[in-house]
Structures are given as structure tokens and as C-alpha cells.
Image (spheres, helix red, strand yellow):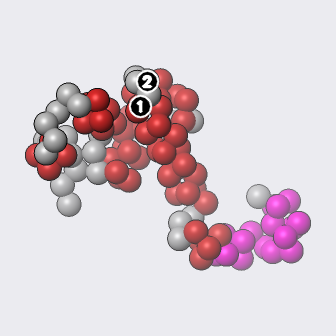
Amino acid sequence: MTRPCAAAGLDKHRALRSFTAAFGLTPMRYLASLRVEAAREALATGASCADAAWAAGFSDQAHLTRAFKERLGMTPGFYQRAIAGAEPANALASSPEQVRP
């Protein structure tokens, strides 16, 4: 991170603050969001949860599940079943897998 910061003429702390102000997330949370989105797209095409986790850059399926639930409010398996039409239309509102606030 030092070289990109130096190229931009910023110290690493100022670069972090600037990134967070511009995107509303820290760089690590932004990266995790990109990975969840990549996994979501893989699941939508029929990939298994483990394959989607690996393809998106997560170290294992558990890390994907944790990040997926945090950002989308449901598990990857539930998401995949919901978009496949295996669940009723109102399944998102009544799933026991869904994270409750």
C-alpha cells in the first residue's frame, strides 16, 4: 500500500481516510463486498457454495457464508434456492436461515 500512496502523494492513513470518504467503506470491506457480489453471481449460474466461495476469493465456504449473511441477510444456499424458484415467492420473509435484525 505504500507505493500507491506515495504515487498519489499521500501517507497511508490519509489514503485510507480518502478511500473511506469516497466509497463509504474501508478498502477491506469494499473488497469483501466485491467478493460477495462475485459469489452471488456464481451462485446464480448454478455453482455450488464451495465453488462460488473459492472462485470469489474466500478461503472457505464458512467465510463466504458469514460475509454473505452480513451483506445480504441470508445464507448463500437460501439465496440459491430462492432464485431457482424452489421456494414460494414469499420465502424470503419466512426463512429460518435468514438473519434476523
Answer left or right for 17 relative to 78.
Answer: right
Residue where numbered disc 1 is placed: 43
Residue 45 visible within the image:
yes
In this view, the residue in front, 97 or 84, is 84
Three-letter amino acid code at disc 2?
A: Ala
SS of the residue under disc 2:
loop
Q: Which residue is mark 2?
A: 47
**Residue 4 lies in the magenta stretch:** yes
Q: Residue at x 40, y 33 (%)?
A: 44
Which kind of residue does numbered mark 1 sit on? Answer: Leu
Q: Is residue 13 visible?
A: no
Q: Which residue is pictured at 30% across the width and 35% down the height? A: 83
Residue 40 spot, x, y in % from top left: 43, 39
* Separation of residues labelled 2 and 1 (CA atoms): 5 Å
Residue at the image point whose x is 28% and y is 45% from the top: 74
Query: Could you say where residue 68 lies in the image, as x and y percent from the top left?
Result: 38, 45
Q: What residue is rendered at 72% in x and 71% in y?
A: 15
> Does the magenta segment cover residue 68?
no
Residue 33 pos. (x, y %): 50, 52
State which region is magenta.
Answer: 2-18
**Cβ atoms at labels 2 and 1 below 8 Å apart:** yes
Q: Residues within 10 Å of mark 2 (few under 14, many from 20)?
A: some
